Amino acid sequence: MIKEIYVNNNNAANHPFHLDGHVFAVMFVGEKGQFPDESKYNKRNPIVCDTVTIPGNGFLVIRFIADNPGIWAFHCHIE
């Protein structure tokens, strides 16, 4: 099952986010005021990783295959 997550960063600082138990494809990274238009998603060669930095006052869209049963955290890596 493919899952898609939209993550907003309403803070001026960049935030690194990590997804436990999976890797994901970064489909779109945007700035405040942009709309995540699926026609502009990077479907050809998306970055695949388990941690990504969300720009200050920005957002991103990730996709991953939910094939690893369990409870997995998606969390910021700033203390």
Image (cartoon, helix red, strand yellow):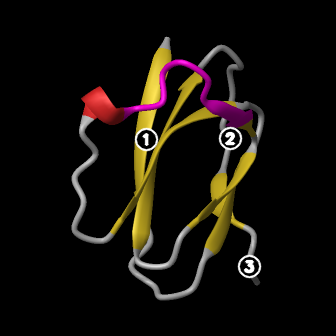
Q: Amino acid at mark 2?
A: Trp
Question: What's under tag 3, amino acid-wise?
Answer: Ile
Mark 1 neighbour class, 10 Å CA radius: few under 14, some 14 to 19, many 20 or more: few
* Residue 78 marker: 3
Dot 2 corresponds to which residue?
Answer: 72
Q: CA distance from mark 2 to mark 1?
A: 14 Å
Marks 2 and 3: which is nearer the front? 3
Task: Tell me the residue at 71%/19% (across/down).
Answer: 68
Residue range highlighted in magenta: 41-48
| Mark in the foreground, 2 or 1 | 1
Tell me the element at label 3. Answer: loop
Question: Mark 1 = which residue?
Answer: 5
**Residue drawn at (77%, 34%), measured in percent from left and top?**
21
Residue 13's disc is none
Q: Is residue 8 visible?
A: no
Please give left or right for residue 39 compared with residue 9 in the image: left
Residue 34's quadrant in the figure? Answer: bottom left
